[in-house]
Image: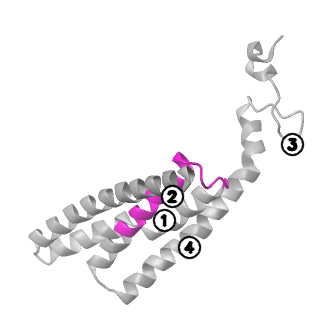
């Protein structure tokens, strides 16, 4: 019987460390993926600690709602760059770079919860105009930053690949 016609419990074996591990059986697949999952969780946690520490340090140096704005916009710019380098163009091919930098460092660095808290604080201070401007400016700048980071990175990578 060919491998594509095998029922899941009798399906083709994968490149798991043990030949008797059938990855079509969910419990066995999870067990086989566990070492990789632990690595990913570890790099996300390490990156998150770095990103959150950097964000906290910036908030100590610049205690203002605009620090959160700057952090979120910068993080969005960098995630645009990273996604082009890792996802679209494959310039960075190391398997743990995306979870470490994208989810960990940049996920810990940027913060929607602090953005929402800053917005609420402005409302509590009876500054609805400032709160609305802050909300709109953050959203516009963050989305624009992702686009700008990705666009500029695409052009730079394309120019480098095209040569002199």
Is 18 displayed left or right of 58 in the figure?
Answer: right
Q: Position of residue 59 (x, y in %)?
A: 38, 82
Q: On the image, which quarter does residue 43 sit in?
A: bottom right
SS type, badge 3: loop
Tell me, yes or no, whether the two marked residues, 1 and 2, touch with CB atoms within 8 Å.
Answer: yes
Mark 3 or mark 1: which is in front?
A: 1
Residue under numbered circle 3: 17
Q: Is residue 126 above or below residue 32?
A: below
- Residue hosting label 1: 106
User: For the point 48% across and 68% down, which residue is it?
Assistant: 108
Among the two numbered marks 4 and 2 on one chain, the one whose residue lies closer to the N terminus: 4
Q: Which mark is residue 150?
A: none
Residue 120 falls left or right of residue 95: left
The nearer-to-camera label among 1 and 2 is: 2
Tell which tag, 1 or 4, sits nearer the viewer. 1
**SS category of the residue bearing label 4:** helix
Q: Marks 4 and 2, Cα distance to the nearest angstrom?
A: 19 Å
């Amino acid at each position: 019987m060919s491998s594509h016609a095998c029922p899941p419990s009798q399906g083709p074996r994968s490149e798991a460390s043990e030949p008797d591990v059938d990855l079509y059986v969910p419990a066995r697949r999870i067990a086989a993926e566990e070492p990789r999952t632990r690595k990913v969780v570890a790099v996300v946690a390490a990156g998150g600690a770095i990103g959150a520490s950097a964000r906290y340090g910036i908030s100590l140096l610049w205690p203002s709602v605009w620090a959160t704005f700057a952090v979120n916009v910068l993080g969005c710019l960098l995630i645009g760059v990273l996604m082009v380098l890792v996802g679209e163009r494959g310039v960075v091919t190391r398997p743990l770079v995306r979870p470490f930098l994208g989810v960990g460092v940049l996920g810990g660095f940027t913060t929607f919860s602090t953005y929402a808290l800053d917005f609420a604080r402005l409302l509590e201070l009876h500054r609805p105009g400032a709160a609305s401007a802050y909300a709109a400016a953050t959203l516009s700048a963050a989305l624009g930053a992702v686009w700008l980071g990705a666009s500029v990175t695409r052009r730079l990578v394309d120019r480098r690949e095209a040569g002199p």
